[in-house]
Image: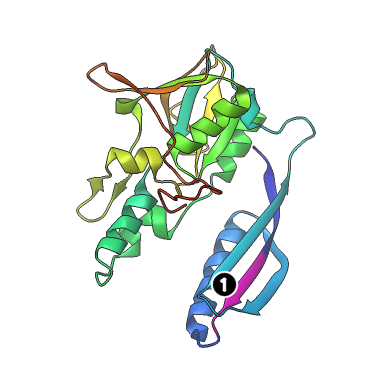
Amino acid sequence: MGGEPIAAFLSLALPNDLPQKWVDGFLRGLLRIAAKSGVSLAGGDTAESPDGILADIVVVGSVPRGKAILRSGARPGDRIYVSGGLGGSAATLERMRAKPKSKLHPRDFKAHFFPEPRVRLGTALRRKGLASAMIDISDGLSTDLAHICQESRVGAEIEEESIPRAVIGKPAQEVDLRFALHGGEDYELLFSVPRGRRIPLRIAGVPVTEIGRIVRGKRVVITTKRGEAHELVPQGWQHFARNKTTAG
């Protein structure tokens, strides 16, 4: 929404036989990214868990009154942009599930092991007045684009070829399109830009890519390089759906 983070609150429930080494590593990672983002760990809670590790993190921030970039501001004619590359975390997770005994080098799978919140990009878009609507891609591009369209009461057309796919592994390989469309956990930003606004290739040091436009109606459509058009059905993480399609 273009806000600036202030404080984080952590609730952590752990099995009583969990090694202290794991806890120390978890907190080091949390405090490292908090410091990088200018956030203080202001409180929370701890408890024993009989069923694995449970962590809940709440971050609070601030934004000037009336300046928050909402999901409801997209209008027909706006262009649609995403930051970074999509699908890296979901593709890594599937690889880990397919070969649970195979160890991955975290540095070769940064999107999954070292997620980077796009705080500076979000605040830059707000300060420069570039975005009409915005959301982070935590549930998958198909699902989060649907959220913007529903809140803004519009439709969208995106181009398959324009969607920037993440590169993972060593040797590096581009992820499948299905991960970029539906995977989630990328935490990149999806935003719309009013027509006539010039958008650079990078904002706050992060690459941004135009992938389509906002249209009238309610349909979300994706076009292929062969010119075929199909409805883009949300297949990312549904928070209250009975059948989960991906890990969000």
Which residue position is annotated with label 1? 27
Q: Position of residue 44 (x, y in %)?
A: 71, 68
**Neighbour tally class for label 1: few under 14, some 14-19, many 20 plus, Cα within 10 Å:** few
Q: Position of residue 70 (x, y in %)?
A: 66, 32
Where are the magenta residues, as a range? 10-15
Residue lying at the far bottom of the rendered structure = 17
Most prominent secondary structure in the magenta stretch? strand
Q: How many marks?
A: 1
User: Foreground: 244 or 156?
Assistant: 244
Q: Quadrant of residue 27?
A: bottom right
Q: Which residue is painted at 72% across and 48% down in the image?
A: 61
Residue 43 relative to residue 197: left or right: right
Q: Is residue 223 magenta?
A: no
User: Foreground: 177 or 174?
Assistant: 177
User: Foreground: 67 or 94?
Assistant: 94
Q: Which residue is painted at 77% across and 30% down in the image?
A: 66
User: Foreground: 72 or 166?
Assistant: 72
Q: Quadrant of residue 192?
A: top right
Residue 11 relative to residue 20: left or right: right
